[in-house]
Amino acid sequence: MVDLNTAMAAAAGDRQKRMADEGKERKKRRSGSDLGLEAFDPVKHVTKEKAETVSMWLVIGFSVLVSLLMRYVLMPRTTVEKSDILYLAPLAAIALIPQVHRIVLPESLNEVYTKGTWFKAGFLHTFTFLAMAFLLVNPPLGDIVAPQLADKWVLVQDDNGELNFSEMKGASSSLTWEVDSSTGLSGDIWLLFGLADNLNVEGANVSIELTNNAGNDLQKTNDLNFWDTHAESIENNTTSSKSISKLIPHGDLDQRFALLLGTNLAVGEHQITVNIIEQGDPWENTRKYVWNLLVVEKLPEADAS
């Protein structure tokens, strides 16, 4: 005689086993669409890959064309002050990419493209244009930057053959020189510095103006005889601990300047203005430095008593 509970438990176990077996069978028979996967179509796949490749090369060609138009058509007609248009206009050309595809490519390829295609094309255009712009505006294809201070500038006091060097200063700085008496800074005062450029530093027109209580003196000319005569002393006083010149760190690639500012500079403020003008490619490059020399009398030492 079979117990009722045992019979019911056996029936329930048998039912669960049948359901599990049926579930496994259904999983075996389920198609890719039942699993949420799109059926693989080789023809469609090849068409899509071909369309994406064609789109990539079309965008690259379009970006190169836009970059060349920017460099050789728009740039020569633009001033430095309005140079923002040189980047804004080419980047705005992203909006034309879908229309270019519709004009150039057949309908069979355009049907494949989606919003994701235009998103990727926008990034490709942006980075291609930036790379091309970097190549086109820098030497040897272009020059849009004026020569700049190679590193430091220094003043040298030539007092009857004895050279005294000031503290070396950077591009935007002022120098204070203390003197013992109110007569001023005695001897010849020379300004030494070097200019560096990415193409041809000697092709620039450099003018130096000294402004002080005596007025403006525009006749400061480069006199390298002073530098050549005192080359050893200048090197010993302007070389870093790493044996690199702080005036002309690039050696012969930098242009040297030695200018006599005056003799016996009076106590007060002396403003040195360096104007640099260079005919670059495609426009004129300019740069201006303003350095201040303040000659002050030393305060008398306090009486210890």
Image (cartoon, grey):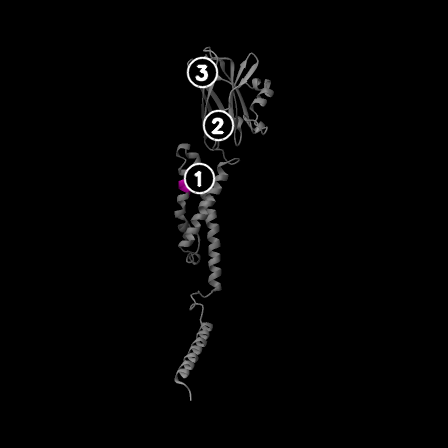
Position in image of residue 24 (x %, y %): 46, 74
Which residue type carries mark 3?
A: Val
Q: Are marks 3 and 2 in contact (CB under 8 Å)?
A: no
Q: Is 267 colored magenta in this rendering?
A: no
Q: Nearer the viewer, residue 281 or 119?
A: 119
User: Which mark is nearer the camera, 1 or 2?
Assistant: 2
Point out the tag, 1 or 3, that comes first from the N-terminus. Answer: 1
Which residue carries the number 2 mark? 278
Q: Which SS type dominates the magenta stretch?
A: helix
Instruction: Read off the magenta span.
Output: 86-90
Which residue type carries mark 2?
A: Glu
User: Which mark is nearer the camera, 1 or 3?
Assistant: 3
Report the Cα–Cα distance between label 1 and label 2.
22 Å
Report the Cα–Cα distance between label 3 and label 2.
36 Å
Q: Residues within 10 Å of mark 3 (few under 14, many from 20)?
A: some
Residue 12, above or below 108:
below
Point out the tag, 1 or 2, that comes first from the N-terminus. Answer: 1
Which residue type carries mark 1?
A: Met
Q: For the C terminus, give its image quadrant.
A: top left
Identity of the residue drawn at 46% across and 56% down: 51
Q: Nearer the viewer, residue 229 or 177?
A: 177
Identity of the residue drawn at 44% across and 75% down: 20
Position in image of residue 109 (x %, y %): 44, 57
Which residue carries the number 1 mark? 70
Point out the tag, 3 or 2, that comes first from the N-terminus. Answer: 2
Q: Residue furthest bottom?
A: 1
